[in-house]
Amino acid sequence: MIIKQKVDERPIHKEQILNVLLIFPLSFLLFGILMSIKEQSFIEGYIKIAKSPTILITDFLELGGLGAAFINAAIIGLGNLYLLKRFKMRINGLLIAAFMTLLGFSFFGKNIVNIIPLYVGGYLYAKNQRIHMRDVIVIIMFSTGLSPIISELMFSDIMISPLNMVIGFGVGILIGFVIVPLSSHMLKFHDGYNLYNIGFTAGIVGTVFTSILRALDKEVEPVRIIYESEDMHIKLLLCGLFLGLIVIGLNINRTGLKDFKNIFKYVGRTVTDFTYLLGYGVTFINMGVMGLCSVGIVTVFGGVVNGPVLAAIFTVVGFSAFGKHLKNTAPVVIGVILAASYLGLDLSSTGILISILFSTTIAPIAGAYGPIVGILAGILHLAVVTNIGIVHGGINLYNNGFSGGLVAGFLVPIIDAFKKGE
């Protein structure tokens, strides 16, 4: 049973929480404008981003430049904050996770063109079911992990013009329409031990879609466009934002550092909403700490903060409001690092770094069964994630969420069977 902790937190209104989230896209907008002045190629870069098929791995920092990539993320972030305000959403942990994940992947696969059809599909689903859009908006925000399907159909040579635009938009609407009922059923497979449930759902949808294309003798061509230049400005921006979250958290809850230790009592299994259980103060502190640790991991291993790494960092930060903390993520991260080291893989490479960070999707396994099982789960996760991309052809951005669902669905029943035997 998940127990709510008593915290001494000053009252905070929904608008104030929205303003905290607003800091991120506004910071990205300012940073993007400054980089655009330096690069002098914003319009051309933004058009490249909008018209790209965005298949894994398409790094917008390399494709369109730093200015265009950060402005793309800012536009998507501001647009979604408007929707949250428009639909009078309560800002809970899952919504924060959805917003931060969407923001992160706006550097790596999502743009204003390929996410709109999914929102239209979600709106039509809500109308069909006679429910309010606020009841599905969070799932639709997560469903944008399948946005490369839309871009691939629209802008690759798979479909002839002008059918490509119509089919791409139509498929996007269809996915937005069916993703809500699908996601609720997929949760049963991993029983809440994979935090990226929509990632698992998106993996299934992406696999079905890719299989249909292959049956029609159409192949999704692999892509590898990665930004590989070290830029300290990005790391400084991230550290400033995450330190800001800690300061804001301490301002909301002045005993936040003392209350922070209570977060380690939670396993993290879905649904573990830290905004409800511990308040916004401790939640923001946890998000800031996890963000700084994520940047630290990238720095220690000599990696580059590029589009995929930004997506991974912000996903970790977002889900630090909804299940993740240092205690339940560390064993899984250690497992991935040990496995990668044993296999002789380059820990500074983008692929391994994002596997390390995204592997925290199965943190609840470590939280529930202890660090040894958590390390084992991390080892298994690396084995699966490095081989699963071929199944969906790179059209599911949440590759690690798909892998995490498979690992949890495979490992947890086995562990439970042994525990019952004991």
Image (tube, rainbow, N blue to C red):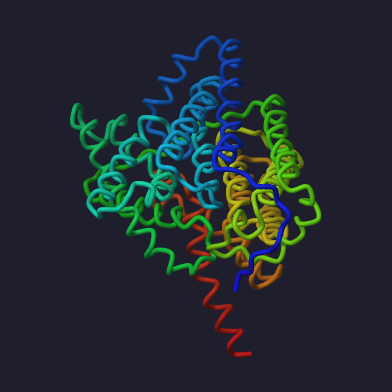
Please state if 222 lies on the left or on the right of 366 as rendered. left
Which of the 4 image quarters holds residue 8? Answer: bottom right
Tally the numbered discs: 0
Q: Is residue 230 left or right of residue 77?
A: right
- Picture quadrant where residue 29 is located: top right
Residue 310, above or below 334: above
When the figure is inspected, residue 40 is found, relative to residue 180, above or below; the finding is above
Q: Position of residue 227 (x, y in %)?
A: 58, 29
Tell me if 255 is positioned left or right of 357 in this view: right
Q: Quadrant of the N terminus?
A: bottom right
Q: Name the residue at 40% across, 63% down.
A: 186
Can residue 347 be seen here? no
Q: Residue furthest front?
A: 11
Q: Position of residue 278 (x, y in %)?
A: 66, 57
- Residue drawn at x 24%, y 31% is 165
Q: Give the percent coordinates (x, y) of residue 325.
A: 68, 56
Please tell me which residue is depicted at 70% across the width and 31% down the height of the picture. 235
Q: Quadrant of the C terminus?
A: bottom right
Residue at 30% x, 53% y is 131
Q: Position of residue 155 (x, y in %)?
A: 31, 29
- Tell me, yes or no, if residue 420 can be seen here: yes
Front residue (pair 281, 378): 281
Q: Nearer the viewer, residue 332 or 82?
A: 82
- Residue reaching furthest bottom? 421
